[in-house]
Image (cartoon, rainbow, N blue to C red):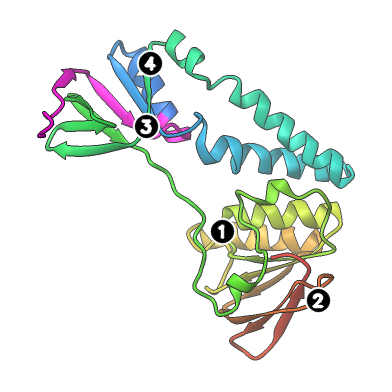
Amino acid sequence: MATSSPSVDHQLDLVVIGGGAGGLAAARAGARQGASVLLVQRGPLGGECTFTGCVPSKALIEAARRREPFDRAIAAARAAVDVVAATETDEVLRREGVELLHGWATFREPGVVDVDRTLIRPRKVVIATGARPAVPPIDGLGAIDYLTNETVWDLDALPTSLAVLGGGAIGCELAQAFARLGSSVTVIEGLDRILPREDPDASAVITEALRADGVAIRTGQLVERIEPLDPKVAARLHLADGSTVEAERL
């Protein structure tokens, strides 16, 4: 039996796809200008910035600067997430004039957004779908229990040593925080400097600051393979120049 296609329910000024930092800012700005706004998000509002990025990382760095023990530092990061997330709920957004649909958005045809068979024809669309951790195709990586910026917040004990693959903003933040908390931290970056997307002078300042906190920085190095070891030293990373880095967590 054939099923009929859903009809276009209503027309809006703006549909924002993605409820992270960028999407929330766009939706709120539209509502403040008097536009009719629909925000589409699969999960809770806030996205990476609120739950696994900017908010917990800054709180962890600050707690580590105060020399808090690991359990209290992680608790402070989680508490900061709760405070910010409370300002980004469905109820708060609706009070600010933003309507919400929780689901998966696709473009059915030019100008028509399909959210789980609810069709909307907005005048404008903002796509702010964010990102997820990039897991590199390194031989042996799948054999160890590696962390990402999404799962590192689940740690219940401070690792004695931590290797960070990638010297971007998140990698540098986590490296600094864990070094201040007492881990032996090594940052491995494939390009010739950390923060390779930023100004070289900024890279130099952050490199100096990280080294002052005891972080070892290996730039211009690719990890060719990862060798699982005993539980106390989870992995040995074999670098392109023939050297190795051992770490309890990665």
Q: Which segment did they paint magenta?
A: 1-23
Nearer to us in this view, 120 or 88:
120
Which circle, 1 or 3, is nearer the viewer? 3
Amino acid type, callout 3: Gly
Q: Is residue 14 one of those drawn in magenta?
A: yes
Q: Which residue is mark 2?
A: 230
CB under 8 Å between discs 3 and 2: no
Q: Which residue is mark 3?
A: 103
Compare marks 1 and 4 and give the one earlier in the sequence: 4
Q: Is residue 43 one of those drawn in magenta?
A: no
Which circle, 1 or 4, is nearer the viewer? 4
Where does residue 150 sit, x and y in percent of width and height?
A: 60, 48
Compare marks 2 and 4 and give the one earlier in the sequence: 4
Q: Is residue 57 left or right of residue 156?
A: left
Q: Which residue is mark 1?
A: 168
Q: Is residue 116 left or right of residue 192?
A: left
Q: Quadrant of the C terminus?
A: bottom right
Where does residue 88 sit, x and y in percent of width and height?
A: 53, 22
The alpha-carbon separation of the residues under discs 1 and 4 comes to 33 Å
Q: Is residue 36 left or right of residue 91?
A: left
Amino acid type, callout 1: Gly
Label 2 Cα crowd, 10 Å radius (few <14 / some 14-19 / many 20+): few
For residue 98, the mark is: 4
Nearer to us in this view, 138 or 194:
138
Query: From what the image shows, is residue 124 above or below residue 158?
Result: above
The alpha-carbon separation of the residues under discs 3 and 2 comes to 43 Å
Where does residue 10 sit, x and y in percent of width and height?
A: 18, 16
Amino acid type, callout 4: Val
Label 1 Cα crowd, 10 Å radius (few <14 / some 14-19 / many 20+): some
Dot 1 lies on which element? loop
